[in-house]
Amino acid sequence: MGRSRQLGMIMMIASSVEMLVMVIAVMRRSYLAIALPVVTAVGIVSALAFWVGWTMANTDEELAALEEQDAVPAVA
């Protein structure tokens, strides 16, 4: 498994755990008026992190290598 796939899996797991912790905290009903906007923001960030992790985990290594070869080198 390539490094980007491992990082993608870690990102998916971390965002899932983060969202689970937030849902459990909201279920306790402490400071719900403040928590709802925070949960919405955390949910959006977690969903974005999960999507990026999913994309990294499911990218074929051959395509990633081709993208690196096609990249324009920086002028030093």
Image (cartoon, helix red, strand yellow):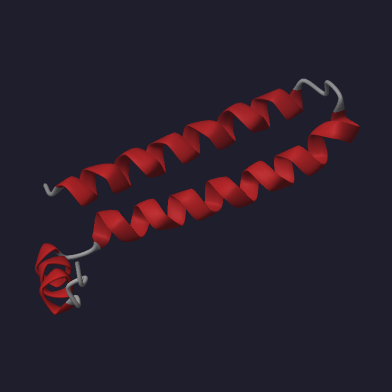
Q: Residue at x 72, y 40 (%)?
A: 39
Q: Position of residue 62 (x, y in %)?
A: 9, 69
Where residue 65 appears, as percent x and y from the top left, is 11, 67
The furthest residue to the front: 76
User: Where's residue 26, x and y in %?
Assistant: 75, 29
Q: Quarter holding the C terminus?
A: bottom left
Q: Residue at x 82, y 24 (%)?
A: 29
Q: Nearer the viewer, residue 66 or 28?
A: 66
Quarter of the view holding residue 61: bottom left
Q: Is residue 60 left or right of residue 35?
A: left
* Count of numbered marks: 0
Instruction: Determine whether 64 is above or below 24 in the image.
Output: below
13 left or right, relative to 24: left
30 left or right, relative to 38: right
Residue at the image point whose x is 54% and y is 45% from the top: 46
- Going 83% across and 20% down the picture, which residue do you hit? 30
What x and y, as percent, mark residue 56?
A: 29, 56
Res. 27 image quadrant = top right
The correct choice, above or below, for 18 with respect to 51 in the image is above
Compared with 54, 30 (above or below) is above
* Pick the front one: 74 or 21: 74
